[in-house]
Image (cartoon, helix red, strand yellow):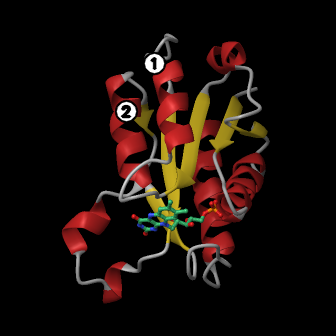
Amino acid sequence: MKKALVLYHSLFGNTKKVAASLAAGISEKGIKVDCVSIEEIDIDLIPNYDFLAIGGPTHVIGLSKEMKKFLNRLKTLNLKGKKGFSFDTRNHSRMNSRRWLLIENSASKRIESKLKKMKIKPIIPRMSSIVIGREGPLESGVETAMFETGRKIGRLLAS
Ligand SMILES: Cc1cc2nc3c(=O)[nH]c(=O)nc-3n(C[C@H](O)[C@H](O)[C@H](O)COP(=O)(O)O)c2cc1C
């Protein structure tokens, strides 16, 4: 049976919620999923998984300090050929933002590019979820959308 790992960093709990929705969706097709924070994961166990999703909050148009540190540790592992997915939360909506280019530099874009450097291929393109204000809550519908994304990933992993 395929094993998936959803890893997240979350300051105020919003990314943790979307990570849980993603994991619940992935598990629907019988994939075994663990959903763990980057602070709690035993890094040596990561190579045991077939699929790795990583998500965090967008901080200063990029990664949180904790995520940066974690991804530097991840680089020391050989994860070549695994499938991955990156996600983030942020508080700017593309639709009403004046600074489109800056906002494109979301945490998930950085995570995705770091995963690619480790030869981890995205199973589907990265995804951002919007929070209202700095501390949330999540915009309505975001958790359902992540659950659906998880189902899609679960189907791809099961096939
Ligand atoms: C130090 C800091 C910097 C932030 N910078 C950005 C930013 O550049 N762009 C953005 O859209 N949101 C930014 N935010 C909002 C975060 O993305 C938001 O707090 C996060 O999505 C909430 O997720 P969490 O509850 O998992 O921490 C920032 C928040 C903090 C605390």
Q: Quadrant of residue 52?
A: top right
Q: Is residue 6 above or below residue 144?
A: above
Q: Pointer 1: residues within 10 angstroms few (<14), some, or many (20+)?
A: few
Q: Is residue 106 left or right of residue 71?
A: left
Viewer-proximal residue, 153 or 126? Answer: 126
Residue under the image location 56 percent in, 39 percent down: 66
* The disc label shown at residue 75, or none: 1
Q: Does the closest atom of ligand 1 sit within 8 Å of the Cβ of label 1?
A: no
Pointer 2 local density, CA inside 10 Å: few below 14, some 14–19, many at least 20: some
User: Which of 32 and 78 lies nearest the eye of the viewer?
Assistant: 78
In the rendered image, is residue 156 in sight? no
> Would you say residue 90 is visible in this rendering?
yes
Whether residues under marks 1 and 2 lie with C-beta atoms below 8 angstroms apart, the answer is yes
Q: Secondary structure at mark 1?
A: loop
Vertical placement of 18 versus 5: above or below? Answer: below
* Foreground pick, 126 / 77: 77
First along the sequence among labels 1 and 2? 1
Amino acid type assigned to the residue bearing label 2 in the image: Lys
Q: Quadrant of residue 81?
A: top left
**Residue 102 location, x and y as percent?**
24, 65
Disc 2 secondary structure class:
helix
Q: Horizontal and vertical percent for residue 20? A: 75, 55
Residue topped by disc 2: 114
Say what amino acid the circle numbered 1 marks. Answer: Lys
Q: CA distance from mark 1 to mark 2?
A: 9 Å
Q: As drawn, is 104 to the left or to the right of 41? A: left
